[in-house]
Amino acid sequence: MSAPAEPEPCRTCQQFDLEEAVARTERDGSRATDCRVLRQRHVAAAHGE
Ligand SMILES: [Zn+2]
């Protein structure tokens, strides 16, 4: 199976993922939401999605 244009791991995305995971672990819902919003903004700006 060949996925078209599989994006290589992005450090910024990974960092947001990690930070959101940490925020969830600490039950910090607003921080987790912040991370998701910032991640989406980054994805739109840097990955054009
Ligand atoms: Zn990224």
Image (cartoon, rainbow, N blue to C red):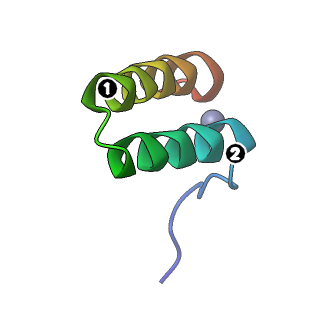
On screen, residue 30 above or below 2: above
Q: Which residue is at a point 69% across and 45% down the rendered structure image?
A: 10
Residue assigned mark 1: 33
Q: Nearer the viewer, residue 6 or 22?
A: 22
Q: From the Cβ of disc 2, is ligand 1 less than 8 Å away?
A: yes
Q: From the Cβ of disc 1, is ligand 1 less than 8 Å away?
A: no
Q: Which residue is at a point 58% across and 15% down the rendered structure image?
A: 45
Q: Quadrant of ligand 1?
A: top right
Find numbered disc 1 in the image and state the secondary structure of the residue it sits on.
helix
Q: Nearer the viewer, residue 20 or 14?
A: 20
Percent coordinates x, y for residue 34 in the rendering: 39, 20
Q: Which residue is at a point 68% across and 54% down the rendered structure image?
A: 9
Instruction: Tell me the crowding category of disc 1: few under 14, some 14 to 19, or many 20 or more residues within 10 angstroms, Cα based.
Output: some
Disc on the earlier residue, 2 or 1: 2
Percent coordinates x, y for residue 46 in the rendering: 65, 23
**In screen coordinates, is 14 left or right of 11?**
left
Percent coordinates x, y for residue 33 in the rendering: 31, 26
In the drawing, what numbered circle is on residue 10?
Answer: 2
Instruction: Tell me the crowding category of disc 2: few under 14, some 14 to 19, or many 20 or more residues within 10 angstroms, Cα based.
Output: few
Q: Amino acid at mark 1?
A: Thr
On screen, residue 14 above or below 1: above
Q: Which residue is at a point 60% across and 29% down the rendered structure image?
A: 47
Measured in 3D between alpha carbons, the distance from the residue under mark 2 to the one under mark 1, in whole angstroms, is 20 Å
On screen, residue 12 above or below 48: below
Q: Amino acid at mark 2?
A: Cys
Number of numbered markers: 2
